[in-house]
Image (tube, helix red, strand yellow):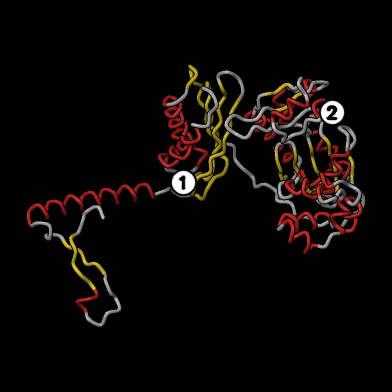
Amino acid sequence: MIVCAHLPRFELVIAAGGPDALSGRPLALAPPLGRELRLGEVSGAAEASGVRSGMPLGEGLARCPDLVLIAPNPLAVAETWETIVRALEGIGAELEPARPGLAYFDAHGLRGLYGGEEGVLIAARQAIGRPVHLGGGPTRLCALAAALRARARRPAVAPGSGAAAARRYLAPLEVGLLEHRAETEALVEPLRRLGVRTMSELAALSRPAVTDRFGRPGTFAHRLAHGQDTPLRPRAATEHLEESMALPEAASGLVLARALGVLIDRLLAHPARRGRTLRAVILAARLAGGGTWRERVVFREATSDPERMRLAASSRLALLPAPADLLRLGVDRFGPPGNDQRALLDEARVVRRRRLSEAVRQVRAVAGPYGALRALCIDPDSRIPERRLMLTPFEGDE
């Protein structure tokens, strides 16, 4: 059985300060600065007024003039979600975090530890330690559908096992269920416009026709409607390595760039790194006026060169919406072990080219422009040797 742990409106609850802050109030996550003006997660009272997540800001305010916008808090969301993920992994679950507030794991290997599937659900709820909707089913989508139907204290489990049971369970459900999968969320509105309302209606369509209309996402949605799903992809075990610096005053610009350089040096000098390269890092900040900011920086290749890391991460500092009083840098993914010698090789190549250019200039100053020549390939297939190559003045910066 696949278990789905769903914490509704997780990001909004964290940003608002707790689930009690959402009761009876029309709230919505404000759009991040510098991005498309669309609302984030919305409360139940806002949904009752017709406001939906992803709706344009102007339309949301027109439908609900009393809508209160809450500034996103991505740093607190990431920290809280990581705590929950580690708690679930602590009971032995091999977890696949889909997004903050939504995760899956297979309960098959845990039934012997907790006395059956019901005991696994109880252990998961106790590990999370907050209201959570738990669902179970033969596939990931069935478990999600069950979790959406479940209550905070009463999990729901889809009956049966196998693709046939999954198809029967999904058949009466609306195609809006596909919004919770990143691969198929863009298909919901086109399917509704075409008159496809339920998963059974989607399954009744021919797969070639769906593929021709929607491409690969349509093929995947059709497979889901038939009770077929991809296997879980549990996340690999990771180490938490992070450095932070409190800034005495609200910093921006050059001061923030220098603080970033210090954090990079500290991160590379940390004993827990053990000579490994870094593939991706998390750059986060606490804003002076309230709120937080968080960006993931993926390097083009795994590196331990501080200059390369500084160039890649400093460009993201321009996205900071306000001055910061705290800057954090953490490892998101390690690369292969070994020292990155490319910087040394590049430096040696630059020095060698500089010396060669200086030598060529000295030779040309003494012997004239034809004092230093190079062989230029003209016609390598010619039968006449003189036509294959010719001599041309050598420039040191070539």
Q: Residues within 10 Å of mark 2 (few under 14, many from 20)?
A: few
Q: Which of 337 and 115 is in front in this view?
A: 337
Q: Can residue 262 be seen in this view?
A: yes
Relative vertical location of residue 166 with respect to residue 290 in this rendering, above or below: below
Identify which residue is drawn at 51% across, 41% down: 273
Q: Residue 344, how many percent across, how many down?
A: 34, 48
Q: Residues within 10 Å of mark 1 (few under 14, many from 20)?
A: many
Identify which residue is drawn at 73% across, 28% down: 12
Q: Residue 275, how many percent across, how many down?
A: 47, 44
Q: What element carries label 2?
A: helix
Q: Which amino acid does label 1 sit on?
A: Thr
> In the rendered image, which residue does mark 2 sit on?
48
Q: Residue 220, how many percent across, how many down?
A: 75, 56
Position of 346 with respect to 13 (left or right) is left
Q: Which of 105 and 47 is in front in this view?
A: 47
Q: What residue type is labelled 2?
A: Ala
Residue 303: which disc? 1
Q: Quadrant of residue 72?
A: top right
Relative vertical location of residue 217 with respect to residue 45 in this rendering, above or below: below
Q: Is residue 112 visible?
A: no
Identify which residue is drawn at 76% across, 43% down: 180
Instruction: Report the mark closest to the observer, 2 or 1.
Output: 2
Q: Mark 2 and 1 residues: CB-CB less than 8 Å, in contact?
A: no
Position of 385 with respect to 301 (left or right) is left
Q: Residue 1, how many percent across, how many down?
A: 84, 50
Mark 2 or mark 1, which has the lower sequence index? 2
Q: Which residue is most to the bottom?
A: 383
Q: Which of 76 and 53 is in front in this view?
A: 53
Quadrant location of the C terminus?
bottom left
Q: What element carries label 1?
A: strand
